[in-house]
Image (cartoon, grey):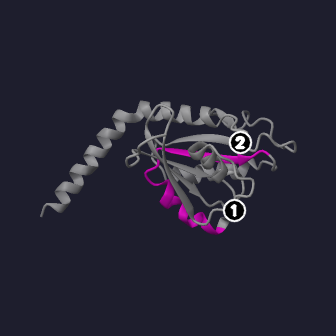
Amino acid sequence: MGDYSLPNYKIVLTGEYSVGKSSLMCRYTKNRFDENSVSTIGAAFSVTKTPNGLNIGIWDTAGHERYNSLLPLYFRGAHVIIYCIDSTRNCDISKINKDIENIKLDTTISTKIFFAVTKCDEKNRKIESLETYVNDKIYYTSSKTGTNIQELFTDIGLYLENIKPEIKETLAVEHEKKKKCCNV
């Protein structure tokens, strides 16, 4: 994908352990799938571009409960959260709602949450449709086959492109505050 500079936008993958967050990131950033990937400890990070050429940093957070206290640190300053749900597990709508409430507490109003149902290539799928519970578009993805991964990141790129002027203004204000603070 070429030359990369520092990312202008922050994307965070979150969801329960073993839902396929790392595989989704690997499929998008390296166009690979590793059948034997291991659980993320803490978080992983990758820099890449959206299909429309925006520099993004993707944070892949660990899904184990013992790392939940770290999540607000990763959510802070995020432009996009990708909430991943494993299609091969029973879906707990009350847990999803609680997770979304917690995400909203740790992000700004302009942070957009995208929903990715993972492992949609598997035969033992337990989730067929979440549209009745979630009011946003849901991306039914497979990191193994690559299904809907490009579509997800294309839509993220379009969203980021539309908030670009707002972010530039916010960054300029934050820069001015720092400048005044440090010019003693």
Amino acid found under the numbered disc labelled 2: Val
Q: Which mark is residue 117?
A: 2
What residue is disc 1 on? 38
Q: Position of residue 63 (x, y in %)?
A: 65, 60
Q: At 43% across and 30% down in the image, what residue appears?
A: 162
* Marks 2 and 1 in Cβ contact (< 8 Å): no
- In magenta, the rendered stretch is 66-87
Residue sitting at the far right: 124
Gap in Å between the C-alphas at discs 2 and 1?
19 Å
Q: Position of residue 94 (x, y in %)?
A: 72, 50
Q: Position of residue 111 (x, y in %)?
A: 48, 43
Asked whether 59 or 64 is in front, the reply is 59
Q: Is residue 6 left or right of residue 62?
A: left
Q: Which element is circle 1 on?
A: loop
Q: Which element is circle 2 on?
A: strand
* Quarter in which the C terminus is drawn: bottom left
Examine the image and state in which quarter residue 137 appears.
top right
Asked whether 121 or 172 is in front, the reply is 121
Q: Residues within 10 Å of mark 1 (few under 14, many from 20)?
A: few
Circle nearer the N terminus (2, 1): 1
